[in-house]
Image (tube, rainbow, N blue to C red):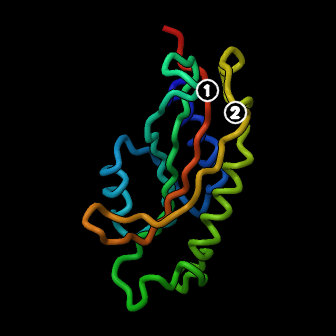
Amino acid sequence: MSPEKLLAALQAYLDTFVEGWGSVSLAGDPYNVYEQLTQGPNSTLIILHWAGDEPAGSTRASPFAKNEIEVYVGRNRGLSLDPNENLVHTDIIDGQKPLFQEVAEIREHLRAFQLNDMPDVADIAHEPRLSYGGTGPVILPNGIPMAALRIRFNVNASLPNI
């Protein structure tokens, strides 16, 4: 299973889920994630990033790869007296749910994602669901935390045929 097919399917799956309160984009590298998270204040932003793969079997010759997917969820609000208020309280300005609640809903929605529903995967060996790998803060390389959270998933799938 190629990364672009996996990311395209996840983006389409999330697009319908967050319609009206968020937007979904892709990032090709970790620094692009940071760039997107620092753009002007707007609705919730969900960024999908393929963070690489590694052999999934007991040998390096394994035909399976463990793909790591990172999902970043943030809501850049600009300067505020209390920049962490939107983590647990409904946003006063636009009534959006607390960021922690949105992250929990996105995490559960992705845990329900069925890879078998993806187009063109009938001939690809894979696990039926994403495996949850944890959630944590987003911290810039210089140590400054962002008003965003990262959800990690992985999935074992056969490598594309050569």
Secondary element type, mark 2:
helix
The residue that disc 2 covers is 115
Q: Amino acid at mark 1?
A: Ala
Q: Which mark is residue 91?
A: none
Secondary element type, mark 1:
strand
Residue 17 versus residue 82 in the image, above or below: above
Q: Amino acid at mark 2?
A: Leu
Residue 39 versus residue 155 in the image, above or below: below
Whole-percent x and y of residue 4?
A: 49, 30
| Res. 11 image quadrant | top right
Q: Is 54 placed left or right of 63 in the picture?
A: left
- Mark closer to the chain start, 1 or 2: 2
Q: As rendered, which of 59 and 28 lies closer to the eye?
A: 59
The residue sitting at the bottom extreme is 81
Q: Are marks 1 and 2 in contact (CB under 8 Å)?
A: yes
- Residue at 60% across / 76% down in the picture? 98
- Residue at 33% across / 57% down in the picture? 34
Q: Closer to the camera: disc 1 or disc 2?
A: 1
The residue that disc 1 covers is 157
- Residue at 70% across / 53% down in the picture? 109
Whole-percent x and y of residue 28?
A: 37, 40
Q: As rendered, which of 16 and 144 lies closer to the eye?
A: 144
| Res. 128 image quadrant | top right
Q: Is 150 placed left or right of 76 in the picture?
A: right
| The N terminus sits in image quarter | top right
Q: Measure how far apart labels 1 and 2 are at the Cα level.
A: 10 Å
Q: Check disc 2: other Cα within 10 Å, few if <14, some if 14-19, many if 20+.
A: some
